């Protein structure tokens, strides 16, 4: 099970959006194998959006673990195996402290997420490069899902799309957001878009 969320008016903190990076244990580098990923932190401030994120965690955990979901959730939280944590958990980035932070990623094998400008139009590689600053405001479309396999139990978040909003002050830290040849140019979205609305769940677990 996965839960799709569209989170508006969030701050975007880019960790590894400059390029697809191969995991060190995956050599040689084989394009399209899904061994590379890009990642960022979606900083959520509004109480309504926070509640929706926590509700999604609750829903995927309960779907997978049933009446032991609370215990499993507590164990994943204790082991830092949740995609969500308080911004205070990023001591090197004090600007994140007031936010609920969602760590999202995208595997190369899934292809590029959708990138849109403030007017929802698709944007060019150069436009994306100029907008991808730490602290940029925008809308993030993510999918939260429960992992339960030989690699362990954790709750992950996948990046489906980003729409950049108004330009704001640039935050420090994070990765270099400069584009390079490893990042393909944006491809126009198909008829079915990541930005299509999805029902929002209610309730939530505590972070």
Image (spheres, rainbow, N blue to C red):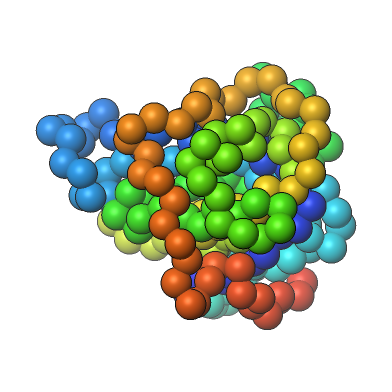
Image side of residue 145 versus residue 172, left or right: left
Please indicate, yes or no, whether residue 205 appears anywhere in the rendered image.
no
Residue drawn at x 45%, y 31% is 179
State the image coordinates of residue 45 (x, y, percent, origin top left).
82, 48
- Residue 132 vs 112, above or below: the answer is above
Comparing 47 with 67, the one in front is 47
State the image coordinates of residue 202 (x, y, percent, origin top left).
76, 75
Residue drawn at x 29%, y 54% is 109
Which residue, as the protein is rendered here, is positioned at the far left? 28
Image side of residue 167 versus residue 142, left or right: right
Please indicate, yes or no, whether residue 105 appears anywhere in the rendered image.
yes
Picture quarter containing residue 137? top right
Image side of residue 164 versus residue 176, left or right: right
Which residue, as the protein is rendered here, is positioned at the far right? 47
Comparing 28 with 116, the one in front is 116
Comparing 93 with 55, the one in front is 93
Residue drawn at x 68%, y 80% is 199
State the image coordinates of residue 5 (x, y, percent, origin top left).
64, 66
- Residue 27 vs 140, above or below: the answer is above
State the image coordinates of residue 132 (x, y, percent, origin top left).
60, 36
- Residue 95 vs 183, above or below: the answer is above
Picture quarter containing residue 22? top left
Residue drawn at x 40%, y 46% is 185
- Total tally of numbered discs in the picture: 0
């Amino acid at each position: 099970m996965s839960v799709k969320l569209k989170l508006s008016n969030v701050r975007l903190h880019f960790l590894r959006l400059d390029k697809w990076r191969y995991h060190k244990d995956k050599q040689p580098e084989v394009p399209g194998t899904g061994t590379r990923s890009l990642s960022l932190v979606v900083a959520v401030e509004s109480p309504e959006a926070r509640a929706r994120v926590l509700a999604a965690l609750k829903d995927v955990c309960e779907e997978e673990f049933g009446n032991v979901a609370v215990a499993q959730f507590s164990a994943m939280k204790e082991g830092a195996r949740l995609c969500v944590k308080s911004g205070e958990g990023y001591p090197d980035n004090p600007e994140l402290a007031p936010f609920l932070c969602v760590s999202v990623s995208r595997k190369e094998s899934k292809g590029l997420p959708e990138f849109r400008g403030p007017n929802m139009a698709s944007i060019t590689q150069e436009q994306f490069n100029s907008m991808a600053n730490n602290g940029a405001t925008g809308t993030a479309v993510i999918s939260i899902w429960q992992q339960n396999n030989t690699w362990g139990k954790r709750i992950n978040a996948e990046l489906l799309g980003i729409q950049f909003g108004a330009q704001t002050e640039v935050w420090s830290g994070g990765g270099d957001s400069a584009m390079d040849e490893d990042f393909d140019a944006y491809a126009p979205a198909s008829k079915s878009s990541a930005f299509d609305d999805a029902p929002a769940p209610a309730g939530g677990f505590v972070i």
